Image: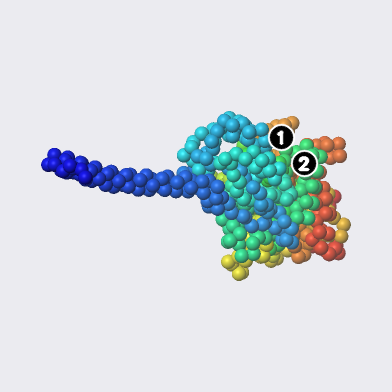
């Protein structure tokens, strides 16, 4: 048994107190450790969650959610509706493709990524790609649009972080240059640049077109015929360009060609000069074609009749200028002769019979003093005289002093020969206009006489080379000198525009054609002449011969030309 003493008790108490104190400190330590472990655990969970979200964002979410373009833009890839001709033939469509983009914030090694991507044919150069990857704050940068399946496979094989693909649509124009000025083209984002693509850029969204296509008034077969014959004429006569429009009597345009042109699929090669639509933007002095309007005014207002006589035996003075005839008859002419033989002198005297006030009022009625309307934005304004003097009246009578677009002129003449009822041009098939009853511009009797006069031009006048067997073509030729600088040049270096405007059949016109050549040159076949009767009239004939069967027009018997009795054919 151990000895018991106060000292041993005191020592035992002291050791017990120390043990109690150590136990108390240990408890505090344990609480402190628990708090630290809890904090560390929460921090670890938070860190792990952040890492997990980032991995999910890169690997899964970014592929499901449409990426954002930079910081503010976005990619709204919308499929556009088809554009078709009047028979449902495809003119423009959207094909599904893939486009390659990059998320710079995910790219690990910008130099390596740029180097590898630049080795793939069709991708941007190394420096350009590296520049696209420079801003780490961006989440979306296009690398290449509308890539081929082969390119996509090569890029995927590289396995580069941040490089991804998105479904896209590429606008394709089936016939390249053929409808370039009418259908137009779109940029790489699908926005319309010109033509119908621009005018109907919003409406061509598939969601906005109930029929899922835009049906035009154009006819593929007719357009091909007009395009080929006009191209051949430009080459044959070494012309600087050419243009043509075929319009139905209800205003629907079946063909519209302007040369030079462009390939709607190759926007990067597009030039401003090639985009110029001569039919709708070019305001030209139209020469003798305006004599159609001149005789229509005289007949309709009653200032002259078919047998009225106008002296064309000598040049007519207008201020310091003289009005002369090209191969004139040098004698008094009836109104019918003045038109059929295309006398400038007699035309000016016809205009004097009704005066400048009436002439201007009719030109306004015919739509030649205002900007035309059509479903494209490329429309030019006429160049109208500042003051409509007597001298202006006479010069306008034979095609100078007033510059209008071919579209305006064709619309005006089509309205006159359409029993005088105003025609509204359109590029849409079966379009319904607001006005149920069209305005009558001239009387039906005036319209019939004008058609008869135009038929006489094809049979006996400058339009003989436009005649087609089995169809009573009617029309008028025009040769207008081009204004260069402050004048029209001298005889040796004058530039000219030659035009034919006519249609068929005479008694019930269904189709009207305007075709022009810009500065055609004389050839051995034309015996040194470069006027309309030698180059544009035969061009019109070749177009007629090709389109008449396509339009299923029946042959016509030669009809009586009632104005012959007013003509002295010598």
Residue at image mark 2: 234
Residue in the image at 71% along x and 54% along y: 91
Indicate which disc, 2 or 1, sits on the residue closer to the N terminus. 2
Mark 2 to mark 1: distance in Å? 18 Å
Dot 1: element: loop
Residue at image mark 1: 494
Q: Residues within 10 Å of mark 2 (few under 14, many from 20)?
A: many
| The residue positioned farthest toward the front in the image shown | 1
Is residue 77 at all visible to an observer of this figure?
yes
On screen, residue 375 above or below 270: below
Circles 2 and 1, Cβ within 8 Å, touching? The answer is no
The image's colour scheme reads rainbow
| The residue positioned farthest toward the left in the image shown | 6
Q: Quadrant of the N terminus?
A: top left
Dot 2: element: helix
Please tell me which residue lies in front, 16 or 210.
Answer: 16
Residue in the image at 79% along x and 51% along y: 225
Q: Which mark is residue 75?
A: none
Residue in the image at 13% along x and 39% along y: 7
Mark in the foreground, 2 or 1: 2
Is residue 278 at all visible to an observer of this figure?
no
Which quarter of the figure has residue 509?
bottom right
């Amino acid at each position: 048994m151990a000895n018991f003493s106060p000292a041993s008790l005191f020592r035992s108490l002291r050791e017990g107190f120390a043990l109690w104190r150590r136990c108390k400190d240990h408890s505090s330590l344990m609480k402190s450790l628990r708090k630290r472990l809890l904090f560390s655990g929460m921090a670890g969970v938070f860190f792990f969650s952040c890492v997990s979200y980032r991995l999910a964002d890169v690997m899964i979410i970014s592929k499901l959610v449409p990426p954002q373009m930079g910081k503010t833009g976005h990619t709204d890839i919308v499929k556009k509706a088809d554009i078709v001709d009047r028979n449902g033939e495809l003119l423009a469509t959207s094909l599904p493709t893939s486009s390659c983009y990059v998320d710079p914030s995910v790219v690990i090694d910008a130099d390596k990524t740029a180097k590898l991507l630049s080795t793939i044919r069709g991708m941007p150069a190394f420096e350009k790609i590296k520049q696209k990857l420079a801003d780490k704050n961006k989440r979306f940068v296009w690398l290449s649009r509308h890539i081929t399946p082969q390119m996509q496979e090569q890029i995927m094989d590289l396995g580069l972080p941040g490089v991804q693909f998105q479904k896209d649509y590429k606008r394709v124009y089936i016939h390249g240059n053929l409808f370039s000025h009418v259908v137009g083209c779109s940029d790489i984002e699908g926005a319309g640049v010109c033509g119908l693509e621009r005018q109907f850029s919003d409406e061509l969204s598939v969601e906005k077109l109930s029929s899922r296509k835009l049906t035009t008034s154009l006819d593929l077969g007719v357009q091909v015929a007009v395009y080929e014959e006009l191209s051949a004429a430009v080459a044959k006569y070494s012309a600087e360009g050419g243009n043509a429009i075929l319009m139905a009597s209800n205003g629907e345009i079946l063909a519209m060609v302007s040369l030079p042109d462009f390939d709607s699929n190759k926007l990067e090669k597009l030039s401003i000069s090639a985009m110029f639509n001569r039919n709708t933007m070019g305001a030209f002095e139209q020469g003798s074609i305006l004599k159609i309007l001149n005789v229509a005014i005289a007949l309709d207002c009653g200032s002259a009749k078919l047998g009225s006589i106008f002296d064309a035996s000598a040049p007519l003075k207008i201020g310091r200028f003289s009005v002369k005839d090209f191969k004139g008859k040098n004698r008094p002419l009836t109104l019918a002769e003045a038109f059929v033989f295309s006398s400038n002198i007699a035309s000016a005297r016809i205009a004097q019979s009704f005066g400048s006030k009436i002439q201007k009022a009719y030109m306004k009625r015919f739509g030649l003093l205002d900007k035309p309307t059509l479903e494209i934005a490329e429309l030019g304004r006429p160049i109208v005289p500042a003051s409509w003097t007597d001298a202006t009246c006479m010069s306008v009578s034979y095609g100078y002093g007033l510059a209008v677009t071919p579209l305006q002129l064709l619309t005006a003449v089509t309205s006159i020969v359409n029993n005088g009822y105003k025609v509204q041009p359109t590029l849409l098939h079966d379009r319904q206009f607001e006005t149920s009853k069209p305005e009558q511009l001239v009387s039906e009797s005036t319209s019939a006489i004008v058609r008869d006069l135009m038929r006489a031009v094809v049979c006996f006048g400058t339009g003989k080379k436009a005649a087609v067997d089995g169809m009573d073509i009617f029309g008028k030729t025009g040769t207008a000198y081009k204004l260069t600088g402050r004048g029209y040049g001298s005889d040796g270096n004058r530039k000219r525009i030659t035009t034919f405007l006519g249609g068929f059949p005479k008694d019930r016109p269904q189709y009207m054609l305007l075709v022009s050549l810009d500065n055609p040159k004389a050839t051995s076949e034309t015996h040194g002449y470069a006027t309309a009767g030698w180059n544009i009239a035969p061009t019109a004939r070749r177009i007629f011969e090709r389109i008449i069967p396509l339009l299923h027009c029946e042959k016509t018997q030669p009809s009586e030309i009632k104005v012959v009795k007013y003509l002295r054919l010598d």
